[in-house]
Image (cartoon, rainbow, N blue to C red):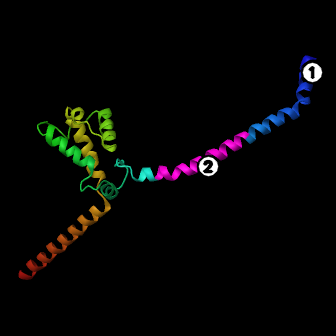
Amino acid sequence: DQLSADMYSFVAKEIDYASYFQTLIEVQAEYHRKSLELLQSVLPQIKAHQETWVEKPCYGKPLEEHLALSGRDIAFPIEACVTMLLECGMQEEGLFRIAPSASKLKKLKASLDCGVLDVQEFSTDPHAIAGELSTLLPNTASSSLIADYSTMLLSEEKHIYQQYEKLADVF
């Protein structure tokens, strides 16, 4: 009987509960409208701030784009790795043969990507630097660089063929 009485009481107050839900939905809708207005007013400022940000990641972007954004002739990670190897890795044996620690390599890549490099930390492990450099070099071959080399190779091939024809004419 108690359950039936509670159910009847709930049904009798159903209009009040519906009114509460309606009020809740209206308040939520107003909150979301105000939030949208605020976000739309702040979004252009955020975009402008991102475009003027000095430190931009270099991994996952074409080489030309990274060089243009950073105003450099040589990509930062390549220059940093070569410089560190020249300073601390030239006396190391098996520099490119010994595999570095995966966690050290991941940390080096992340630090190079954000433009912050602790030379002291990585100078003790030149194998990590060499490992990162060996992964960077094949990945930075851009299409324009490849096109330049293929053009150069084709011109050399034509030059050799012309010399071969001249030798064939002599004999």
Q: Residue at x 91, y 25 (%)?
A: 9
Q: Are marks 2 and 1 in contact (CB under 8 Å)?
A: no
The three-letter amino acid code for the residue at tag 1 is Ala
- Secondary structure state at the residue bearing disc 1: helix
Q: Which mark is residue 79?
A: none
Count how many numbered circles sit on residues in the image: 2
Quarter holding the C terminus? bottom left
Report the side of 28 relative to 37 (left or right): right
Q: Quadrant of residue 24?
A: top right
Residue 11 belongs to the span the image colors magenta: no
Q: Residue at x 29, y 38 (%)?
A: 108
How packed mark 2 is, by other alpha carbons closer than 10 Å (few <14, some 14-19, many 20 or more), is: few
The span picked out in magenta is: 27-47
The three-letter amino acid code for the residue at tag 2 is Glu
Q: How far apart are labels 2 and 1 at the CA level? A: 48 Å
Q: Quadrant of residue 133?
A: top left
How packed mark 1 is, by other alpha carbons closer than 10 Å (few <14, some 14-19, many 20 or more), is: few
Question: Mark 1 — residue?
Answer: 5
Question: Mark 2 — residue?
Answer: 37
Return the residue nearer the eye: 98 or 10: 10
Q: State the image coordinates of residue 54 (x, y, percent, origin top left).
A: 35, 49
